[in-house]
Image: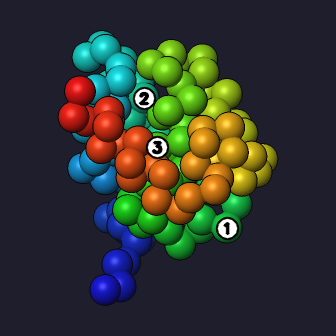
Amino acid sequence: MIRSKTVSSYGESMPPRLSPRTLQLVEKIFSPKQIAEVTHWLEDECGNNIPFCDKHDEFQMERIRFAVLKLSNGNIKKLLAAIDEARMDWRDLFMAADFGYDVNAHELWAKEILEK
């Protein structure tokens, strides 16, 4: 299934929104007061601007965004540091989050967090 990028009413490409699971993780990891800010950072700074992710949709961004969320540990400053790491080299981000050796590790982590 091919997904098209979201396009604004002005014809500009918009960053991928959060997938439903990514949003659930944000709501589980961060306080209600922080959700809007975290959503903003993930959508605007951890999307198609990440190297080699220029055509990714919200589902293809999950592995990177889950790694960022895992490393944040519910802290905005750590979230921003993880986003910076993703911009430099997301492979290092995956290793730091223990997602580097198994392409499904992020799925297992998300399931574990959401079942708590």
Say whether residue 10 is visible. Answer: no
Is residue 105 shown left or right of residue 82?
A: left
The residue that mark 1 highlights is 52
Please name the amino acid that badge 3 sits on. Phe
Q: Give the alpha-carbon distance from disc 1 to disc 2, as whole Å.
A: 22 Å
Q: Give the alpha-carbon distance from disc 2 to disc 3, as whole Å.
A: 12 Å
Residue occupying image coordinates x 64% and y 53%: 100
- Answer above or below: position of 3 versus 96: below
Residue occupying image coordinates x 57% and y 29%: 71
Mark positioned earlier in the residue sequence (3 or 1): 1
Residue occupying image coordinates x 53% and y 25%: 72
Q: Give the alpha-carbon distance from disc 3 to disc 1, as whole Å.
A: 17 Å
Is residue 15 shown left or right of residue 102?
A: left
Quarter of the image with the C terminus is top left
Mark positioned earlier in the residue sequence (2 or 3): 2
Quarter of the image with the N terminus is bottom left
The count of marks equals 3
Q: Position of residue 30 (x, y in %)?
A: 35, 20
The residue that mark 2 highlights is 38
Where residue 66 is drawn, which disc sits there? 3
Please name the amino acid that badge 2 sits on. Val
Please name the amino acid that badge 1 sits on. Phe
Between 46 and 96, the one nearer to me in the picture: 96
Looking at this view, name the residue that lies furthest to the right. 88
Tell which tag, 2 or 3, sits nearer the viewer: 3
